[in-house]
Amino acid sequence: MTNAPYGRNCHIHDDAAIGTERGRPPTIGDDATIRRGAIIYDDVTIGDRFTTGHHVLVRERTTIGDDVLVGTRTTIDGRTDIGSGVSIQSAVYVPSDTRIGSNVFVGPGAVLTNDEYPIRREADLQGPTVEDGASIGANATILPGVTIGDGAFVAAGSVVTDDVPAETLALGAPARTEPLPEPLDRPNQIE
């Protein structure tokens, strides 16, 4: 663990690895809890009240807002922007070049992708965009370049191949969209 600039009242377990001593140390805001086995790379900026589970990986050039939870064994690859009030559950994969807005929920085991033709041919990596207030259910897969609109809901196990308009429900494999049912027609309550 390096002498990275931590905010006040941070609880960082001894075996968490914070920074590499080779680049700009990560910046971590006030009241963070970073648990055993977590690795936070250099050139990461994290806001206040950040909480991790165990064995979380946050790669370089990632920006994370305030009040963000990242669950156990989740990987956030570099060049990713995450807003405030976000809950990313356990075993989630967030690839590089992804943007996640504020007040977003990402369920356990969800996989976001950024490579349209994995190792088959040269292609620019393009992660998905998850806009403010969206929810992604457990074990959903979001393909490269897809946008999940404001307040949209992706059902568990769905495979999202096309953009999901704001305030709609995406479900199935491949996912189709329909209006949000009444129980889902309200903002996320992440606290």
Image: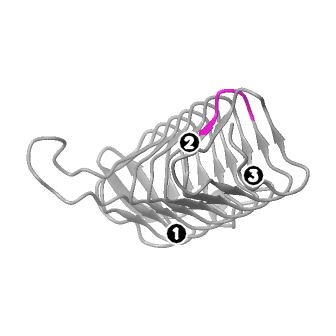
Front-most of residues 37 and 165: 37
The nearer-to-camera label among 3 and 1 is: 3
**Quadrant, the N terminus:** top right
Name the outermost residue toward the left.
121
How would you rate the neighbour count of disc 2 (Cα within 10 Å): few for under 14, some for 14-19, many for 20 or more? Answer: some
Residue on which the image places disc 3: 50
Q: Identify which residue is drawn at 47% across, 70% down.
A: 149
- The quarter of the displayed image where residue 189 is located: bottom right
Q: Which residue is mark 2?
A: 20
- Chain part drawn in magenta: 35-39
First-in-chain label (3 vs 2): 2
Give the labeled residue for mark 1. 131
134 relative position to 111: left or right: right
Q: CA distance from mark 3 to mark 1?
A: 20 Å
Q: What's under tag 1, amino acid-wise?
A: Glu
* Foreground label between 1 and 2: 2
Q: Circle 3 — which element?
A: loop
Q: CA distance from mark 3 to mark 2?
A: 20 Å
> Residue visible at 67% across and 64% down?
65
Give residue 125's position: percent from left, percent from top: 26, 57
Q: Amino acid at mark 3?
A: Phe
The x, y position of residue 77, in whole percent, is 45, 47
Q: Are marks 3 and 2 in contact (CB under 8 Å)?
A: no
x 75%, y 51%: residue: 50
Residue at the far front: name it: 22
The reply, left or right, for residue 146 in relation to residue 69 is: left
Q: Which dot, 3 or 2, sits closer to the camera?
A: 2
- The residue sitting at 54% across, 45% down in the picture is 137
